[in-house]
């Protein structure tokens, strides 16, 4: 769904409730600041990176971290291009 389509749906909802809709410019500004900004980023973290960070924070030995990394990346779907680090 594009922002233009979302704006049209927003306009329809406003008109159905007797509300004057904001301009497309205002709608886009709010959309980009509230829903597309850094705080709104909702990508799935890399499972291996998250587990490694947890192991490092726990104070375990480096060998254990290496073993966990190897195990994670040997498992199917342990790391893919849709995850973030």
Image (cartoon, rainbow, N blue to C red):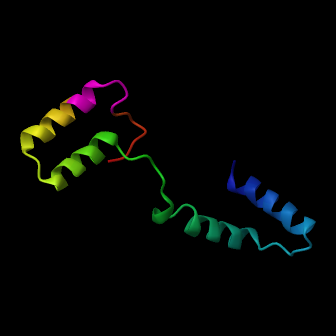
- Residue 41 in the image: above or below residue 46: below
In this rendered view, identify the residue nearer to me: 45 or 15: 45
Is residue 27 in the magenta section? no
Task: Identify the residue shown where x is 69% and y is 56%.
Answer: 3
Residue 9, image quadrant: bottom right
How far from the left and from the top, in percent, is residue 83? 39, 42
Task: Identify the residue shown where x is 26% and y is 25%.
Answer: 74
Residue 30, image quadrant: bottom right
In this rendered view, identify the residue nearer to me: 21 or 40: 40
- Residue 39 in the image: above or below residue 55: below
Is residue 15 found left or right of 67 in the rendered image? Answer: right
Task: Identify the residue shown where x is 8% and y is 43%.
Answer: 62
Is residue 38 found left or right of 53 in the rendered image? Answer: right
How far from the left and from the top, in percent, is residue 54? 24, 50
How far from the left and from the top, in percent, is residue 26? 69, 73
Is residue 25 found left or right of 66 in the rendered image? Answer: right
Task: Identify the residue shown where x is 22% and y is 45%.
Answer: 52
Is residue 46 found left or right of 12 in the rendered image? Answer: left
Residue 21, image quadrant: bottom right
Is residue 73 in the magenta section? yes
Q: Report the magenta residues as a range.
A: 71-78
């Amino acid at each position: 769904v594009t922002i233009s389509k979302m704006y049209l749906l927003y306009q329809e909802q406003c008109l159905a409730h007797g509300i004057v809709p904001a301009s497309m410019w205002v709608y886009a500004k709010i959309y980009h600041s509230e829903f597309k900004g850094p705080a709104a980023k909702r990508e799935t973290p890399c499972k291996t990176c998250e587990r490694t960070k947890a192991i490092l924070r726990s104070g375990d030995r480096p060998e254990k971290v290496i073993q966990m990394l190897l195990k994670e990346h040997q498992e199917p779907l342990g790391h893919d291009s849709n995850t973030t680090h």
